[in-house]
Amino acid sequence: MDTISLILGAVIGVGIGGAIAWLVLKKIQEKYASKIVLDAQNESKNILKQANIEAENIKKEKIYQAKEKFLELKAEHEKVILGKEKKITETEKRIRDKESQVSNELAQNKRLTEELNTKTEECEYRIAMLDKKQEEIEKLHKSQVKQLEVISGLTAEEAKTQLVDSLKNEAKADAMAYIQTTIEEAKLTARQEAKKIIINTIQRIGTEEAIDNCVSVFNLESDDIKGRIIGREGRNIRALEAATGVEIIVDDTPEAIILSCFDSVRREIARLSLHKLVTDGRIHPARIEEVVEKTTKQIEEEIVEIGKRTIIDLGIHGLHPELVKAVGRMKYRSSYGQNLLQHSREVARLCGMMAAELGLNVKLAKRAGLLHDIGKVPEVDTEMPHALLGMEWAQKYGEKPEVCNAIGAHHDEIEMTSLLAPIVQVCDAISGARPGARRQVLDSYIQRLKDLEDTAFSFQGVKKAYAIQAGRELRVIVESEKVTDDKAAELSFNLSQKIQTDMTYPGQVKVTVIRETRAVNIAK
């Protein structure tokens, strides 16, 4: 019983002690918590105070920066305003100057208009006087004709018929006598006249271009090699000339021999063959024939390669092998000193650019531009114009009709049926006419055209005159009131005779006199 009482007393004591301890701890905890809260409140107040101070500082700094920015913007704005005011002042000055200039021009135009009106009135008065005098002359002419009819007892038509018949018979007799005399003189002086004609032709063609285009110079290391090239009794040089078809001229020119031939391909074969023979040192007829044969094959392969490179550079595909060879041969052909291949490449590029601007087929335009002069490199000589020959080749080797027409019509031999034709014609003229392209002297060419037109204007009744086709044709437009049909034919003959007598020109000049009468009315 005592033990249980002790245990219960101990348990109760422990419970009371725990309760007291819990109360003490709670008090201590509440005191500590209140201290923490107080400290936190003080700390927050300090933070707020510091934040307010920093915010105030930042506010002052921003206000200062804003004032500085405002002053800067104000200064820039004033500068811009000053610049605009300066520009406005300058513009106003220019406007005032323009106004004064315009007023001066208006005054000058007014003065010129008055002068023009005065001159117009004078011209109208003179025209009226001329018309009046012309009527008087016609009346006098008619009265004279009537008087002559009364005196002769013939009408004007009968007199004209008799006069024409007598003139015809007289002219026929004179012409027969002149022809007989001319034939007899020609028989006596035929050889001399032929020589004169040949010499005049050579002089008019121009020997400088012929020399440049037909001669190549082969340089030698020493004059000793000339004897080896000639050979014993000239066997080597004869064999070389026979194999190449080129005339070899060995003269006193130091360390050089001359190769002469119209065919530039054969001339190039001869030059390369000579180079190989001289380098090798073995020069005899059998070796010459072997080297020439190999060189010929090499040149043919080179021609094909040049043609292929050209069409690849221009982006042209599907060209017939024969046309490719013709393109390659153009490298060895020139016109007025202008290389034909370079000219054709230039025309092709120009045609492509122009076709692109006009919205046409660029590839076809380049094709036509490249092939437009292939008729200039025939393997066999022909008298057919190169444009028509080139068109036949293009048709033969399957080119499109537009390309064929452009080739054949670029010198107006046939009618243009496609839009490519005028483009090729224009580009060909551009390439040939640009400064430095050809050896033709521009000043003399322009002067010849001007002289042709001035010669036409020297005749009465000529209204307009145009030298066309590079001076090969002269178109003359006459006034229908002053020139009759008979006088037009007479004018054409007299003009051709005067051109033939007074001017020097290559080839022929066609004189065309155009007389036109129009009656125009308007139906409303």
Image (tube, rainbow, N blue to C red):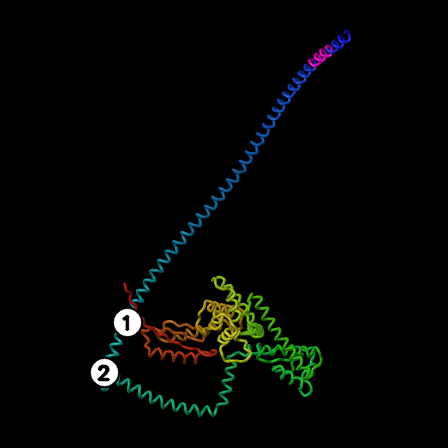
Q: Is residue 186 visible?
A: yes
Q: Residues within 10 Å of mark 2 (few under 14, many from 20)?
A: few
Q: Which residue is tagged 2?
A: 147
Can you tell which quarter of the image residue 71 is in?
Answer: top right
Measured as percent of width and height from the top left, residue 314 is found at 56, 66
Identify which residue, 355 or 172, lies in the foreground: 355
Which quadrant would the C terminus be assigned to in this image? bottom left
* Left or right of residue 39: residue 196: left
User: Residue shown at 50%/87% (left/top)?
Assistant: 194
Residue extending furthest toward the top? 2
Measured as percent of width and height from the top left, residue 241 is found at 63, 83
Most common secondary structure along the magenta stretch: helix
Q: Which mark is residue 131?
A: 1
Residue extending furthest toward the right? 3
Q: Residues within 10 Å of mark 1 (few under 14, many from 20)?
A: few
Provide the secondary structure element on which disc 2 rests.
helix
Measured as percent of width and height from the top left, residue 151 is found at 22, 86
Provide the secondary structure element on which disc 1 rests.
helix
